[in-house]
Image (cartoon, rainbow, N blue to C red):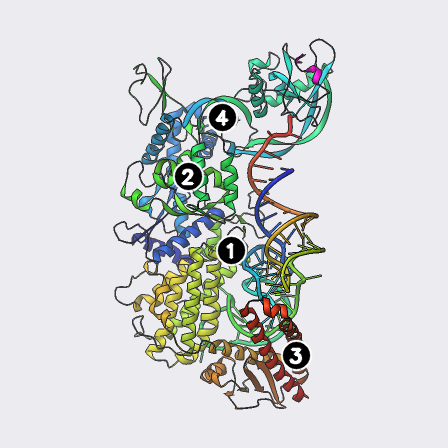
Amino acid sequence: MDKAFDFKTAQQRWYERWETSRLFEAQPDSGKKPWSIVIPPPNITGNLHMGHALVFTLHDVLTRFKRAQGFDALWVPGVDHAGIATQVVVERQLKESEGKSRHDVGREAFLERLWSWKDQNQGAIENQLRRLGASVDWTRKRFTMDPDLNRAVRKVFAAAYKEGRIYKGPRMIQWDPASQTALSDLEVKYVERHGKLWHIRYPLADGSGFVVVATTRPETMLGDTGVAVHPEDERYGHLVGRNVKLPLTDREIPVVADSFVDPTFGTGCVKLTPAHDPNDNAAGRRLGLPSITVIGFDAKMTAEAGPAYAGLDRFECRKKVVHDLEALELMEKIEPYTHQVSVSDRSGAVLEPLVSEQWFMKVDEAAQKALESVRTGRIKFTPERWAGVWEHWLVNIQDWCISRQLWWGHRIPAWTCDACGHINVEEDAPAACGKCGATTLTQDPDTLDTWFSSALWPFSVFGWPDQTDDLKRYYPTSVLITGYDILFFWVARMVMAGLTWMDDVPFRDVYFNALVRDEHGAKMSKSKGNVIDPLETMDEFGTDALRFSLTAMAAPGTDISLSRSRLEASRNFCNKLWNAARFVQMSMDADVTLAVEPELGEAEYWMVGRLRESLGQATRAIEEYRFHEAAEILYHLVWDDFCATYIELAKVTLQQGTRAQKAAILHFLDILLRALHPLVPFVTEEIHAAVMADRLPAGEPELLAARAWPLDDPLLKAQGGDPGLVPRFQEALSAILRLKAENGVDPAKRVPAFCTIKALEPFAEGLKSIARLESVVFPEGDVHGATRAVAVVSGGMVALELAGLKDPAAEKAKLEKEKEKLEKELESSLARLADESFTTKAPEAAVAKMRAGAAEKRSRLDKINELLAVAN
RNA sequence: UGGCGCGUAGCUCAGGGGUUAGAGCACUACCUUGACACGGUAGGGGUCGGUGGUUCGAUUCCACUCGCGCCAACCA
C-alpha cells in the first residue's frame, strides 16, 4: 500500500466495479425485506451543486447501510424535466445560435431540440451522481417525461377531471410576461422595491370637489371601476353611492364601501382595479363591479386603456399617466415608498396579476388527508417542527393552478371540439367528440406544471397505473430525504397524490436536510462568488472527504457551514484510516485470515467493547437520521480508540505475535471498514481490496459494498478481561508523558518509571515503548523521592526517576494548582451532600454519584498533600 | 404583522435538569519513534446573549428582553 490514499484513481475504478457487479440493483426475488427510496429528481438543466451533494450523500449513506443490514435496498434514480427552466435555456440557445424564437421554428421542431438537449444533459448529471458514489439502481432510472410517466399523468388528469377535482375557468392568476405563462402561488417571490406612492385626485362627477386615492401602480387606474372607502369612515360616508369621474378616461365610476379598506392607510380611499390586482378582484366580485383589462399578456396596454395609451409597455404607460395627471393638476403628491413587488421565482420578471382561463386542481379533500397522515403519525417528520409549517399551509391551501403556457412538459389531455365547443378530457386522444360526435378536435396547447408529474413520482416510477411487481413491493417507499424549501411544492403534493391515487402515503418518514452554506453561514450564490463546487471539491479532497464532511455536519435542523478546514479534516481522517490499514497489512503474515479465530488479551477485550458500544450507537444514530452523530462516533472509534490506543498497544505484541493474535487486529479493521463504508465508500473499498480480499472466509462477498453491517459480528459478543484496565493505562501513560513535558525532559529521553497500580503490570511493555521509558516497575508502597517526579492518578501514583533533570519548582506549582482545584471541587461536593434537600429530593443515583465523586477527590487530595509534604 | 429557528471556545458547530460543558479547525511549546507531519505529545482558551422565574440543583425548562436568520402574509 502507498503511504497515502490516492483517491483520484480509486474513485472511478470502484464505481465501475460496483456497477458492473450489479450490486446496486434491486433484488425483488431475494426473499429479503424491501427497503426503498426515490431520488428527488434533479433538474436536467442543472449541474450537481453542494445541495445535491448533501442530499445524495445522505441517500447513499442510508441506502448502503440498509443494504448492508440485509434489506433488498432500492434507490430509484431519475431526472426532472423542469418545465420553465429547461424551456428558457433552450430558447436562449436558439436565440443565440440562430437568432430565432421558438415560434419561428414551431412547436414540433422546438420540442425536438428540447429532447436532444435533454438527452445530452441527462448523462452529465448521471455521471456526477456516479462520481459521488451514489448506489442507485440504474436499471430503474426514470425521467419525468418517460412514456410510462406521461401515461400516469394523463390517467390522473382524466380521472381527476371526471371526478370534478380538476376544472377549467377564468380566474386571477400570477402571469409571468417574460416566460409567457401562468404561475402557481408558490412560484411567486416578493422582493422589496423602492417605489413611489402616487396620490391622485379623482374629481366627483357633480363637480363638488374630489377624492384622493393612493397607488403604487398609477397605470392601472385606466382599468379602475370603483373607489372604495371603509363603511364606517366618517370622512367619506357621504360619498358612498356617488360617482367620480375617472381621469384620463371618459368613464364615471362609483364610490363604494367595503370593510377591507384600511382607513388609516394613505388617504383611506382605494382605487379598485378588479382586472389587475388580486384584492381588487375579490372586492370587485363582492361588490359587483365590472372588470376592465387594460394590460395584456404581453405586459402592454390594451385597447381598453384608451387610444392614448394602447400599445405602451406598462412601465412606459406609468410614466405617461403620471405626466398626464400632473398636466391636469390631478397629482396631489408623490411620496417615496418601499413595498413588496411580486416577481417570478424563475425569470425574475415583475408579475402581472391577470384574469385568464386556466386549469385548476381542487385539493381540499386531499389536503385534509395529508393533514391527518402527519397528525396521526403515519408520516413522521425529522426534524419534527416542520409538522407545524405543514399544518399551517395545508389548512390555508388554495386551489392549484396547474396549467402552464409552455411547450416543454406534459401536454394537457383535453381536446376541444371544433364543432360544438365541448371539452373532451381523456387519457388518450379521442377519435370523436363525446358530445356531438364530430371528429375535428383541437388539443389544449398548454402543458402541466412540472410539479404535477413530480407529485406522482413515488408511484409512477414503479409503473403505475399498472399494478407492477415493483409497485407492490416498493410502494410505499421507506423514507424521503429532501430540502425543506420544497415542502409545499413537492412533499405535500406527493403525499396528497399518494393518498388520492394509491390510497396510501408515499413514504413513512420524511427527513428534511439542511441548506449548505459557506464557511460563514452565508447562502452560496454565484453573485457572491462563495460557491463551493462539489466536483472541484471531490477532485481536491476526494469524494470520501466531501461525503464525510457533509455527513458529519448534518445535524437535523441546522444549516451546514462548509469550509476548507472541514474538508481537510475529513481528508485527514480518510488518510488516518488508510494508514491504520497500512499498519495492519504490514503486520500480517499470509496465513492470517478472517477465518482464523482471534486470540483476545486485555487490549483486545477492551477494543471489542469499544466496537460493540460504538457500533450500537452508530446503528441507532443512522436509523434515527442522526447522521452527524454516527459520523462522530465512528471518527472517534477509528482515530482515538483504534489508532491512538489499540494499535499503539498492539505494536508491542504484534512483532512476534501469533497467528491468532494477529487475526484479532485484522478482524477489528474488517469491522471498521464495514462500518465506515456507507460514509466513505471509496477509501474503504480500496483498503478492503488491499488488505482483506485475500483473507476472506469462503462464501464471503469479494466487494466490501456487498458485505454485511458488522453489528452482528460474532467477535463483538466476546466478553472478558477487565474493561476498566485500558482507561487506567491511558491515564497512567498520559500522566507519565505529562511529567516529562512539565519537567522539560526530552520525550525521547529514556528514564526509569514507577507505577503503584499493580493491575497495570500487563501493560508494562506498552508503557515502556509508548512513553519511551528505560524501565517500568510496580513497587508495593511509596514511589516518591527527592529525584523523582510524581503524579497522582485515579487509584494510585506514577513516578519518573529524573535525577538531575527534575524541575522541582514546576512540579510543586503544578501540585499546588491541582490541590487548589480539587479543594474547591471537594468543598462544593461536600456542601451539596450536606444539603438535606439534595439528599432527600434528588434521585438516589445522583446522590450516590456525588458521594463517589467526593470520595475519589478526597483520596486524590490526600495523595497530593502527601507529595507536597515531601516536595521540599 | 404573524410563525419558526438560532445566539455555547478566536472560527464553524455538537450537546443537554445532576460533580470539572465537548468536537473539528485555529493558537502555544515540544517531537521526523519503523502506519500516518494529511502525524504525535503536552497545553492555553468559554460567567453557554441579557434579566427574572420554576427546581434540592438551570447552560439545559418557562416568561420577558436584545441581536441575527428563515418562512408566511391582501395594506393600495
Q: What subunit carries mark 4? A: A
Residue ID for mark 2: A494
Query: Quarter of the image containing the N terminus of chain A?
Result: bottom left
Q: Position of residue A518 (x, y in %)?
A: 56, 50
- The amino acid at mark 1 is Met
Q: Which residue is mark 1?
A: A553
Residue A447: percent from left, percent from top: 41, 28
**N-term mark: 4 or 1:** 4
- SS of the residue under disc 4: loop
Amino acid on which the number 4 mark rests in the picture: Gln
Q: Residues within 10 Å of mark 1 (few under 14, many from 20)?
A: many
Question: So how many labels did they put on this image?
Answer: 4
Residue A395 in magenta stretch: no
Q: Residue at x 41, y 61 (%)?
A: A676
The CA distance from mark 4 to mark 1 is: 42 Å
Image mark for residue A123: none
Q: Earlier in the sequence, mark 1 or mark 2?
A: 2
Q: Which residues are magenta?
A: A236-250
Q: Do discs 4 and 2 share a chain? A: yes
Nearest to viewer (mark 1 / mark 2): 2
Chain of the residue under label 2:
A
The disc label shown at residue A180, or none: 4
Disc 3 residue type (three-letter): Lys
The residue pinned by badge 3 equals A819
- Closer to us: A63 or A8: A63
Calculate the distance from the C-alpha at mark 3 to the C-alpha at mark 1. 39 Å
